[in-house]
Image: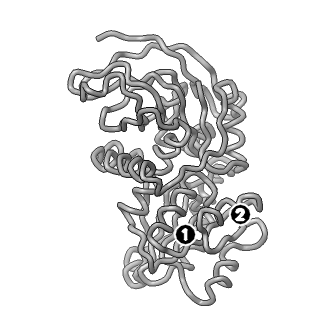
Amino acid sequence: MGAIFSEAFFLTKKGEANDAFDLRKFELNLPVGTEVLIEVESFGLNYADVMARKGLYREAPAFPCIVGYEVVGKIAHVGPDADQSKLGKRVVAFCRFGGYAKHVITNDHATVDIGTQSAEELLALCTQAVTAFYMAEYLVPVHKVDTVLIHAAAGGVGTMLIQLAKLKGARVIAKVGRQEKEGLVKKLGADIVVNYNTSDYQEQIKKALNGERIDISYNPVAGSTFKKDFALLGSGGRMVLFGGSELSNGKWGMLSKLNFLRKMGLIIPIGLMMRSKNILGVNLLKIADNKPKVLEFCMQSVVNLYSEGKIKPQIGCVYKATQLAEAHSALERGETTGKLIVNW
């Protein structure tokens, strides 16, 4: 089995971005089975990385670890059972952690050939667009008669959800927290924009809909927003939970976690049936682990939509590797729009 030496940003402890990461050399075994080894040129940031840094993401490996879900780079080695034709190909790839490195191992089914296409835009396709596509096309398909609420609408997943919903002709309510983000979501096609920092977003939506209810909520916040969204759902309504960013604001450890759960309340299944409402949870890592063919289908689908010009990834900012802490802090504070990229 051979090995190579590489370099990565290791997450070494909980805390602020300036103190939590350490650039280290490490040894990486060459791929086996259907694995491939990628020489990384760029990697993307996700809010789950912030949650891991704050010690709030239970799926993350123990410290010290390398986080990161997606990379663009060239396949330098392939395992004996992998697709041998991929050797030397430039790909966008989904990885189960390990993305903040100059080399990463993943499975060949988690890679898509990209030729000379933009690394920045394709990184936005990997986790963000695949998550959006899985939710809006595979799990809970949007229809033209639907009214869709999208939280964090100016972020990587949110901007993709707006575009996918508008492709179906749905009415989109985009929720943002800063005035400067309103123009972006309107440009992407949002029909109604609510700023939760100006007044209660639930009341804004009620007023805008004039008695109508929403059909789908795509919610990465949870916590106090759960009950509000549940009340806004009409018959047949679907709430898709794919994060818990409100929890990351907690400063009191277990007390913050208990308060987060208290705000969400208790749901009894028979009540869902009687009201004809639906709650679905999404963890893309579990899909990658247990449904690799679904992940592969979603990845190829979003690359096809991008190649056809039907979706346009939104790039928030591109950072140098030396600016990783700056990028992490900006993402945590909600100052950014679109996808954040780091180039080696």
- Asked which quadrant contains residue 52, the reply is top right
The answer to whether residue 243 is left or right of residue 184 is left
Q: Classify 10 Å Cα crowding around label 2: few (below 14), some (14-19), many (20 and above).
A: many
- Describe the element under mark 2 as helix, strand or loop: helix
Where does residue 324 sit, x and y in percent of width and height?
66, 30
Q: Which residue is mark 2?
A: 182
**Which of pointers 2 and 1 lies earlier in the amino acid sequence?**
2
Q: Is residue 95 visible?
A: no
Q: How is the image coloured?
A: one colour
- Three-letter code for the amino acid on which mark 1 is drawn: Gly
Going 63% across and 40% down the picture, which residue do you hit?
Answer: 54
Where does residue 337 sit, x and y in percent of width and height?
66, 51
- Describe the element under mark 1 as helix, strand or loop: loop
Going 53% across and 78% down the picture, which residue do you hit?
Answer: 214
Report the front residue among 167 and 159.
Answer: 167
Going 69% across and 79% down the picture, which residue do you hit?
Answer: 203
Report the front residue among 19 and 329.
Answer: 329
Q: Which mark is residue 70?
A: none
Q: Which mark is residue 265?
A: 1
